[in-house]
Image: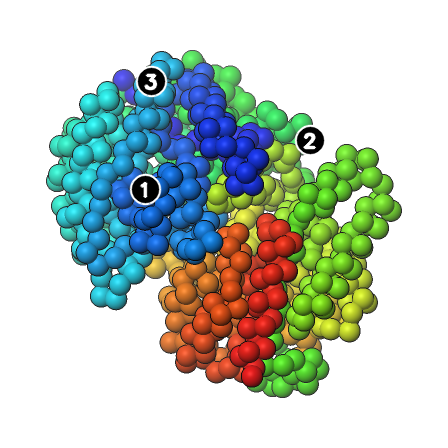
């Protein structure tokens, strides 16, 4: 019979229980046993929640303390040499993710086109693999002891090798497929011996442009794994299979999952290519966004698949793991009833899957209440006057000049004359530590326990203290510290029309880092200035240049739950106009250096190269729209996070920011090679301090990185800065690291 299935569930807990336990463990406040107890309770709670929702196929091993790709590195024994002497499993795991005093952390980058970060596997010439099956077996047996027979989830071998980084020149990670296959086969045999009848094996690279070598690796791997033990569900998501349809459909596995939310057009091609004995899992409930499913529309896809396959070869599932969704809408007591009726979090998505499955098994009448509520919500959303604003749409339709007044070289001369900075100027990316006191003051203000006057006084004191610290350390360009901000996207969304906010809508970004994305439900505009008060106040306290800090339109778009009733490009343009107004107001207030962060620009790049040009055109234009309203002597900065830049260097250059800062320390400046090879014309701040690790880098380490940066990039183009903002770090390590950073810059000048 047709089955309801889930592909993965959020790990952190409704109230971020996992995050709090992790950070307590890292601080030494609790031991490993206490951390594991919190995790075990979360797993049991989530398995039971799925069972109660009527989900028949429930995943296990989808839980990770930090990241599921890091878990896979541990699973197959791909331990970088610098960590092999760590014998304690927990210290090894978190050491690989966060670094140790002796060993820098592994590199981190974005999981396809999401805001989830994964730890990049490191592979070497002569790499060997060894199975460590403790976790997937333990989690399967843990659920079994609760009376729940789960389907274990693992990252597939071709995706693992495709995402891994070769640490030796000349090594192609895919050449290691022969060594890796036996490890996966052994794992599958052990899972089968434990009682697992099915295993979900995630191969999302199947929605990318594959090389012949990748296609060959798929055929080789699954020729062996398809008969190694349990039945395999080959899981794809985030896009369409397209030219990989026949490959995916004919691999010797028992089932295939496809994403019909991101790529509904692929259904017919997959149905035509699927052999007569395979199960098809149709992802018809959006695992990446929070809008309620239109059950009538979703049921149309289900019915088409059922008509072709019959009842015994069909599963109904979310488009991807629900990792990217908040846990439970029921906890959102602050949302108005109308808006809330348009939304669905992970728990509600399970109910939608169950309703679709019930309707397919017993007829739509059996799920009438769910279908009626879905239709009513869809009709109300379409008719709501709060979504569309004529004035916003009219302004967005206007032609606005995207170019700065002069080219970069002319602007650079005027900016150097204005700011008179030394060579290798030093700055930070924006935020400073959000201490316990800062968080408590914000919470007290929100609860009404601290009035606006008292809260402002507290923020002014924190800001002034941070400026004095920066002056004492000797930084050249200062920032105000951002103590008034809860999150780099949420803060702006709270001040823009067209946004709504949740109370517990947390999703994992990486490790213990959770974000609460805003909900963009309507047309976006800026009622009033958002940052001028704090930037101007900070500037009044110092003679040094003060940098205004903004989040760019593409990043606000990417890191929000975005409306789906109009093109993303139009929503982004509306945000770009709002940021443009803020940039102009900052300039009028005397702020001469303004940073517009776009860490999500590369993340938003479509997974298929055929779609890149269209995306980059509107994404770059939206950044230029936000930045082009100022005079030549106003210096525009931008910042980008971990990403592969090689393929989009022309677009980055076209953004025409005066200075770009990028995260490069974990890759030992390898990510800078794209800028070097492209001969990037503007100024660059390659990060010399990995702020995602508690490790304090030595001055010598920073000098080595900057010397690498200067190989092929003129010194007069280089800035010295950390990888990213400092809000998650503590003051002692921040001060020590920044002292080393400034001293490194002074040594370079000498």
Q: Quadrant of the C terminus?
A: bottom right
Q: Nearer the viewer, mark 2 or mark 3?
A: 3
Indicate the position of residue 34 as horizontal and vertical percent values: 50, 28
Asked whether residue 589 appears in the rendered view, the answer is: no
- On screen, residue 89 versus residue 49, left or right, reads left
> Do labels 1 and 2 touch, CB within 8 Å?
no
With respect to residue 130, does 577 lie above or below? below
* Image quadrant assignment for residue 553: bottom right
Residue at figure coordinates x 53%, y 44% from the top left: 513
Q: Which residue is mark 3?
A: 144
Residue at figure coordinates x 40%, y 62% from the top left: 667
> Do labels 3 and 1 touch, CB within 8 Å?
no
Label 3 SS: helix
Q: Nearer the viewer, mark 3 or mark 1?
A: 1
Residue at figure coordinates x 65%, y 80% from the top left: 421
Residue at figure coordinates x 63%, y 29% from the top left: 332
* Image quadrant assignment for residue 353: top left
Count of numbered badges drawn on the protein: 3
Report crowding for label 2: few under 14, some 14 to 19, many 20 or more residues within 10 A (C-alpha): few
With respect to residue 45, does 221 lie above or below? below
Q: Which residue is mark 2?
A: 334
The numbered mark, 3 or 1, whose residue comes first in the sequence reads: 1
With respect to residue 17, does 749 lie above or below? below
Indicate the position of residue 354 as horizontal and vertical percent values: 42, 21
Indicate the position of residue 107 as horizontal and vertical percent values: 41, 55
Q: 333 or 73, which lies in front?
A: 73
Label 1 SS: helix
Work out how far the residue at label 1 is from the one at label 2, CA to CA, in angstroms. 41 Å
Label 2 SS: loop
The numbered mark, 2 or 3, whose residue comes first in the sequence reads: 3
Which mark identifies residue 74?
1
Q: 570 or 318, which lies in front?
A: 318
């Amino acid at each position: 019979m047709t089955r309801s299935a889930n592909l993965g569930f959020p790990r952190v807990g409704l109230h971020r229980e996992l995050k709090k336990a992790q950070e307590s463990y890292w601080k030494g406040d609790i031991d490993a046993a206490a951390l594991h107890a919190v995790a075990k309770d979360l797993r049991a709670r989530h398995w039971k929640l799925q069972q109660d929702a009527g989900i028949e196929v429930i995943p296990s091993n989808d839980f990770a303390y930090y990241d599921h790709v890091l878990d896979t590195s541990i699973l197959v024994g791909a331990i970088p040499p610098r960590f092999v002497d760590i014998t304690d499993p927990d210290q090894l795991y978190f050491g690989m993710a966060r670094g140790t005093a002796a060993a820098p952390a592994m590199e981190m980058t974005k999981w396809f086109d999401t805001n989830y970060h994964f730890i990049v596997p490191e592979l070497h010439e002569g790499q060997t693999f060894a199975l460590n099956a403790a976790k997937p077996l333990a989690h399967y047996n843990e659920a079994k002891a609760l009376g729940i027979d789960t389907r274990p989830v693992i990252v597939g071998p071709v995706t693992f090798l495709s995402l891994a980084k070769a640490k030796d020149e000349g090594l192609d990670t895919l050449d290691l497929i022969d060594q890796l296959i036996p490890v996966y086969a052994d794992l599958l045999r052990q899972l089968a011996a434990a009682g697992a009848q099915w295993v979900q094996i995630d191969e999302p690279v199947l929605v990318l442009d594959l090389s012949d070598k990748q296609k060959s690796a798929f055929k080789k791997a699954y020729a062996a794994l398809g008969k190694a033990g349990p039945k395999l569900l080959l899981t794809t998501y985030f896009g369409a299979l397209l030219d990989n349809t026949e490959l995916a459909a004919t691999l010797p596995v028992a089932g295939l999952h496809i994403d019909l939310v991101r790529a509904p057009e692929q259904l017919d091609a997959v149905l035509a290519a699927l052999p007569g004995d395979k199960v098809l899992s149709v992802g018809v409930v959006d695992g990446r966004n929070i809008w309620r499913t239109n059950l009538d529309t979703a049921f149309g896809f289900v019915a088409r698949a059922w008509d072709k396959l019959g009842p015994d070869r069909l599963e109904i599932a979310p488009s991807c793991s629900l990792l990217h969704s908040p846990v439970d809408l029921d906890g959102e007591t602050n949302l108005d009833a109308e808006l809330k009726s348009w939304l669905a979090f992970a728990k509600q998505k399970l109910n939608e899957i169950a309703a679709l499955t019930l309707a397919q098994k017993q007829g739509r009448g059996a799920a009438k209440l769910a279908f009626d509520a879905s239709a009513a919500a869809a009709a109300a959303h379409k008719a709501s006057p709060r979504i569309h604003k004529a004035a916003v749409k009219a302004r967005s339709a206007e032609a606005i000049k995207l170019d700065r007044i002069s080219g970069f070289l002319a602007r650079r001369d005027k900016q150097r004359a204005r700011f008179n900075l030394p060579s290798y100027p030093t700055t930070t990316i924006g935020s400073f530590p959000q201490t316990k006191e800062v968080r408590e003051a914000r919470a007290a203000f929100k609860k009404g326990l601290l009035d606006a006057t008292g809260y402002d006084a507290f923020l002014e004191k924190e800001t002034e203290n941070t400026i004095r610290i920066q002056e004492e350390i000797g930084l050249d360009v200062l920032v105000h510290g951002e103590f008034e901000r809860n999150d780099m996207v949420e803060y702006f969304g709270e001040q823009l029309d067209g946004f709504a906010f949740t109370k517990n809508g947390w999703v994992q970004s990486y490790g213990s880092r959770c974000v609460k994305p805003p909900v963009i439900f309507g047309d976006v505009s800026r009622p009033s200035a958002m940052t001028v008060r704090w930037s101007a106040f900070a500037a009044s306290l110092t003679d040094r240049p003060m940098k205004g800090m903004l989040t760019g339109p593409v990043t606000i778009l990417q890191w929000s739950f975005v409306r789906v009733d109009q093109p993303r490009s139009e929503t982004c343009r509306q945000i770009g106009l709002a940021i443009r107004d803020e940039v102009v107001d900052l300039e009028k207030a005397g702020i001469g250096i303004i940073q517009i962060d776009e860490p999500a620009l590369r993340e938003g790049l479509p997974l298929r190269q055929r779609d890149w040009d269209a995306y980059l055109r509107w994404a770059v234009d939206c950044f230029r729209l936000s930045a082009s309203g100022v005079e030549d002597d106003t210096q525009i900065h931008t910042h980008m996070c971990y990403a592969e830049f090689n393929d989009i260097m022309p677009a980055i250059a076209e953004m025409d920011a005066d200075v770009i800062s990028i995260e490069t320390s974990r890759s030992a400046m390898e990510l800078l090679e794209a800028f070097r090879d492209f001969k990037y014309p503007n100024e660059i701040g390659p990060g010399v301090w990995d702020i995602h690790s508690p490790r304090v880098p030595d001055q010598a380490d920073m000098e080595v990185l900057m010397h690498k940066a200067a190989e092929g990039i003129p010194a007069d183009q280089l800035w010295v800065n950390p990888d990213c903002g400092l809000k998650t770090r503590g003051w002692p390590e921040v001060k020590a690291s920044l002292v080393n950073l400034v001293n490194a810059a002074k040594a370079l000048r000498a």
